[in-house]
Amino acid sequence: MRYSKYFLFTSKENPAGAINISHSLLIRGSFISQLSSGIYNFLPIGFRVLKKVWKVIEEEMDRIGALQVLMPALHPSDLWEKTGRWQTMDNVMFKLQDKKGANMVLGTTHEEIITDIVSKFVKSYKNLPLLLYQIQVKFRDEIRPKGGLVRAREFIMKDLYSFHTNWECLDKTYQDVYQAYVRIFERLSIPVESVEAFSGPIGGDVSHEFMVVTEAGEDKFVKCTNCGYAASTEIAQIKKPEINYKYKPIDKLNKVHTPSVSSVEQLVNFLGKKPQNFVKSVLYRVGSTYILVLVRGDKEVNEIKLEKYIKNELKIMEEISMAKEDDFDRLGSVIGFIGPLNLKDKILFLKNEKKLSDEIDLKIIADFSVYGLKDVIVGANEKDYHFVGIDFDNIEIDSFADVSTVIDGDKCVKCGEEYRIFPALELGHIFKLGTKYSEPLKAYFADKDGKIKPMIMGCYGIGVSRIISAILEAYSSENSMTWTFNSAPFFVYLITINMDDEAQYKISDNIYNGLSNFEVLWDDRKESAGTKFKDWELIGIPICIVIGNKIKEGLVEIKVNPNFPKTISNKKINSEFISKLFDSLSIFITLQEVEEKIKHIYNELDGIVNG
């Protein structure tokens, strides 16, 4: 491809609103252009990258026997209403009505649609297991899209769905897809971490996310510094301490005046204490039961873990919600100043006075982080007042539980050593769905005995367009892109220093044609050498061949993107071999060696990355 004939318009300026490297570089390199907030055009060179990523994913899906389909982006509401997600996913859905007044939605995901398809065709165990996938545009009405392709309102995903007769069959497919994902990210040279994850609105009990460590991401995961166990902060568990608790009510409470100071941050400044010297009290309501959750001042309540504890341990199945102002009033407390001391006595008094229903109950759940605390500060259930000098066993606690979000230094649930927190960007997510969709959408099959059963399902997604940002975040710098072998839009950038020099032009043309099978972008513009080198650096093509005055000596210059060798690093690959591979590209080589060297490097890399 000749630069002069290509749709490529680079920019020196950082685009307004770009908050991460990938967003800035993709705009500056004219890989994408913004149409509207969170909505982007893929320009020719960006679409080449997208197709490269797409191809790797398709090849690995084919390898595990998945069949590709294409489902509509526009969905009728009825299927979503049957599964209940018309309401539960309302906050991210683009909803509309057609001219007949029918409710429609732009697909945020396709579980309902694929299940409907399979239910119409598959009726027997003989047709299972079945793996169907698509690569399709998705829509999510993000309130604050940001980071370019990192969080967009319209984006491209690969979603695979599997259908099974039993859980054992699903387990096998789950592992097959897991390994396929490992291969995809290895071939794209993306350093991902596989972590245990929360299923969220998709559903299911078992799931894993594939995360790349980057400040550009909006997710976090924890990893043990000893055993390597990793999990999303949404579900990561903490090792349970050996609890020896006996309630010791305190005779005299020391109350301090804290006017208009209610948050831990404000109290830290007002009282000159550390966050660890406080116990937060957070009030929830589940049916007729109030749950007061206690966590150490430097931690936050994890509502996913809390809800699971309430349902599994307390056996309360109603929906959990944050308490409202009238709930505090009902219990004789105050928002911002609620605390566990004397709160049960207040409730008992209100019941005796017939001011509170006998059905109302209060459970005080303390996070593991509260166990063992001494000389801490808690709310006094009175506006502008807190109690000080409280020990953990001065508090009447019903149970200790792991209900806080993990922070650096918390103890690993597997081995007891310390966790470390990493900022991350989620690239893939796989789920065991079970019958969450097959039952309401009547995706049934007849087993060997003729019994009708719901299909067992799995769901497996990859953010195709997001991968493009992830690659750049992993390897690029402020003014320089670095693509990996299987994602680079071109493999060679051919620079002709002086297009008016007949000899330089002729040799460039010969090399361009000789390497036609190796994806060459020939910078044939009549621009300065500095401009051409800056554009090569910005666009991020791995290898650069420079045709200049040295051709009088029969030599051409070869350059390698300085970060490109890092993208080939792999546990299976000897780093010394990689160094030698690129060192073999001398600064200057003879004209006779150029094509041979490029072909050799390309074939070696192809074997390493795709072999």
Image (spheres, rainbow, N blue to C red):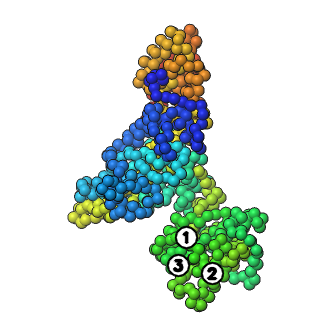
Secondary structure at badge 2 equals loop
- Compare marks 1 and 2 and give the one earlier in the sequence: 1
At label 1, counting other C-alpha atoms closer than 10 Å, the crowd grade (few under 14, some 14-19, many 20 or more) is some
User: Extreme left residue here?
Assistant: 450
Task: Identify residue for label 3.
Answer: 289
Hey, what amino acid is under mark 1?
Met
User: Is residue 591 positioned above or below 453 on the image?
Assistant: above
User: Is residue 120 positioned above or below 581 on the image?
Assistant: below
Task: Identify residue for label 1.
Answer: 322
Identity of the residue drawn at 56% across and 31% down: 11
**Where in the figure is residue 139, as x and y percent of width and height?**
43, 50
Q: CA distance from mark 2 to mark 3?
A: 15 Å
Identity of the residue drawn at 57% across and 9% down: 553
Secondary structure at badge 3 equals strand
- Return the residue nearer the eye: 228 or 455: 455
At label 3, counting other C-alpha atoms closer than 10 Å, the crowd grade (few under 14, some 14-19, many 20 or more) is some
Residues at discs 1 and 3 in contact (Cβ within 8 Å): no
Task: Identify residue for label 2.
Answer: 332
Residue 176 is at least partly visible in this image = no
Nearer the observer: mark 1 or 3; the answer is 1
Hey, what amino acid is under mark 2?
Gly
Residue 509 is at least partly visible in this image = yes
